[in-house]
Amino acid sequence: MNDWVQEFSADSPLAMAVEGFAPRAEQQVMAERVGRALASGRSLVIEAGTGIGKTFAYLVPALMSGRRVIISTGTRNLQDQLFERDLPTVCAALGRPVAVALLKGRANYLCLHRLALADAGELRLAGRELVAELARVREWAGSTLSGDIAEVSGVDESSRLWPQVTSTVENCLGTRCDDYQRCHVVRARRQAQEAQIVVVNHHLLLADLALKEDGFGELLPGADAVIVDEAHQLPDTAVQFFGIAVSSRGLTGLVRDLRLEARRAPGSAGALEQACDRLLLATRELRLALGPTAERRDWQTLGPKCHAALDTLAGICGELAADLNRLEGAQAGLDRCAERTRELSVRLERLLGAETEEGLRWVDISRYGFTLHLTPYDVSDRLQEVMRARDCAWIFTSATLAVGEDFGHFTARLGLAEVDSCVLASPFDYARQGLLYLPGDLPPPASPNYTRALIEAALPLLEAAQGRAFLLFTSHRALDEARACLSSLDLGYTLLVQGSAPKRELLQAFRVAERPVLLGTSSFWEGVDVRGEALKLVVIDRLPFASPGDPLLRARIEAARRHGQDAFRSVQLPQAVIALKQGVGRLIRDPADRGVVMLCDPRITGRGYGRVFLHALPPFRQSRRLADACELLSDNAIEGPGEAVHAR
């Protein structure tokens, strides 16, 4: 049995290799629990508070076990960090070089077939910027070994070019592709099959478990364990994954690919041109029928005009599939388009004919497009089915999984009936490092003047902190009101607003700006790490209850009701508690960090369920006195027993 205390001690090889490493009892306990799960093959759910060092706490046992392990993350950023920084560091420190592979989704790899289509097709007539980006990608394509588009400089990750030169499950030709032997996706998957440690994301993990994509077979065979980091994201990813969706983007993409492939198959273009035009027109007519507003709408609210447009679209898809069947064998690209059209037609028919018990039907309407959804009420049985098929240890970890000490909210969504679990608290001294400020004179959150009152209450704290603040909102509407209010006051803050630039650029600007104040919604409540003096204040406008109109939430509420549960207590409250823990967790990211969380919603003290939130939060000192918060934020704050600290 390993001595995990020694492995994570001050004189361990890991301590020698990692700058600033300090032994943490919680990290040692987590490593011991992970090691035990790997050895026994049992599953484990573990909440590891901020600062424990959970990544090393599961990487060290995984590498030392000698077993084949899949590590799944929620974001590409963490995938890259694990593969490029953390795994090499731990391997070197332990003196255990092992084969490690990074496997991303198809959309992250250049597709040589689609690059040739882009060269030969309509992209030549596109704008100057897109043509220049294509030239840059073409030059890079001649030298890259991995085909990972993250290597390309000078082309924004949101560029319209990427969907045209990367593949999806729908448009990939698989083994029928002339470039199959040179395919970057195939090469990455072969490397993954030969590696001891494979780093994937949640969506790819689910695809491997459930789909076994055509042309490639099982991506990740023979794993002894699966470690799911950022595990709190997995249930929602699974709900979307196991649902059915048809989008206007997918429809127009099919038409584009059909036209490009038809040009490579003599005699086919003319026969398909009219059918493609009809499908495009039907797609546009449905978007017009849905109305001008960008929103999420329940299927039941769609009027006769929308249903007629849906029936027309489904009929045209069926006719196009029949037309393509008559051309089968003409060319591999056209054959794949025929398969896509048949699959699309089947999904549309399922959507239009779905019974109420199958799930929630809804439409996500954007400015120019739409996505039709059928969201299952509950995927726990399906998840358990695919997890049992991979007979190995499952380890789920995140900084936010439990409500208090209770993991029921998380485990029920995964169908985990019997599983080992534990909560490991953060090693940070929250009572000394921070303060939870609960202002007592704000109006109810439903008040039309609530956001302005919130900003006015926060102004003294913003001044004391000299900006250096995150203002986190539960809606874009509240964010816009706050932006307008702060802009009109012209107090000399550098306002950085979500949506005005990519997230990474906003965070970089925040770290270097004078008196920065960043306004963000849901995407800034988690996965954001700003340490040190750059961030001193986090203001949270409301308790983050999801909108009752959110389709994913409504599906879960309906599932709870079908099981005879109190939907508020079993679904809405736990989800909001975990979201609040994520938001509050933006403040203290390092043992030397100091600051204030201003939690504005008066329901935190005025409603009985407020105690559930407070009990779940880190053990900050709490105060309703503005002076206490301003004193801690002041650059003149001094350290004392139980007092606020500024100096690092």
Image: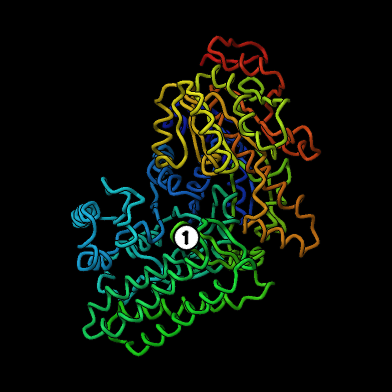
- Residue at figure coordinates x 57%, y 58% from the top left: 296
Q: Amino acid at mark 1?
A: Leu
Q: Which residue is mark 1?
A: 204
User: Counting other residues with Cα less than 10 Å from the Cα at mark 1, is it few (<14), some (14-19), or many (20 or more)?
Assistant: some
Q: Is residue 176 visible?
A: yes
The answer to whether residue 62 is left or right of residue 377 is left
The quarter of the picture where residue 234 lies is bottom right
Q: Nearer the viewer, residue 331 or 301?
A: 301
**Residue situated in front as seen by the camera: 475 or 389:** 475
Colour convention of the picture? rainbow
Q: Quadrant of residue 456?
A: top right
Q: Give coordinates of residue 87: x percent, y percent.
A: 42, 44
Query: Is residue 518 rendered to the left or right of residue 33?
Result: left
- Coordinates of residue 228 in the picture (x, y in percent): 55, 52
Q: Please say if 30 is above or below 418.
A: above
Residue 443: give x, y in percent of width and height.
71, 32
Question: Is residue 439 or residue 456 the one in the foreground?
Answer: 456
Q: Residue at x 67, y 39 (%)?
A: 543
